[in-house]
Amino acid sequence: MARDGRHALRRLFRDWPFSTAAVVILGLGIVANTAIFSLIDVALLRTPLLAEPDMSTVGLAAASVPAWRAATMDPLKTLRHD
């Protein structure tokens, strides 16, 4: 086992440009795979945080108000600037 490890290290150091290229290409492949999976996970696999994503502005408007005030407030009324 130790002899195999020494042989592998010797081959890596003897042909260092190939070894460097292999490590860089593997690293880029891992990074690309992770990025693509993260995008697919967020876009397709996770459930939306809101039941109705179209109403997200109402959620943001209500989030900036204290809880005691939000309980008595009409969300649609806060969006109007009358």
Image (spheres, helix red, strand yellow):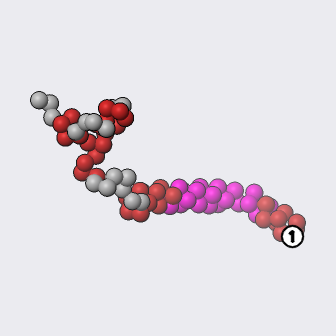
Disc 1 target residue: 1
Instruction: Give residue 57's quadrant in the image.
Output: top left
Residue 1: x and y in percent read 87, 70
| 14 relative position to 40: left or right | right
User: What span is colored magenta in the figure?
Assistant: 10-33
Identified by mark 1, the residue type is Met
Residue at coordinates 47% horizontally, 61% vertically from top-left? Answer: 37
Q: Quadrant of the C terminus?
A: top left
Please tell me whether mark 1 sits on a helix, a strand or a loop. Answer: loop
Is residue 14 covered in magenta?
yes
Is residue 32 covered in magenta?
yes
Q: Which residue is nearer to you in this view: 79 or 44?
A: 79
Q: Which residue is nearer to you in this view: 23 or 36?
A: 36
Residue 35: x and y in percent read 47, 56
Residue 53: x and y in percent read 28, 52
Residue at coordinates 82% horizontally, 65% vertically from top-left? Answer: 5
Residue 18: x and y in percent read 64, 60
Residue at coordinates 28% horizontally, 54% vertically from top-left? Answer: 52
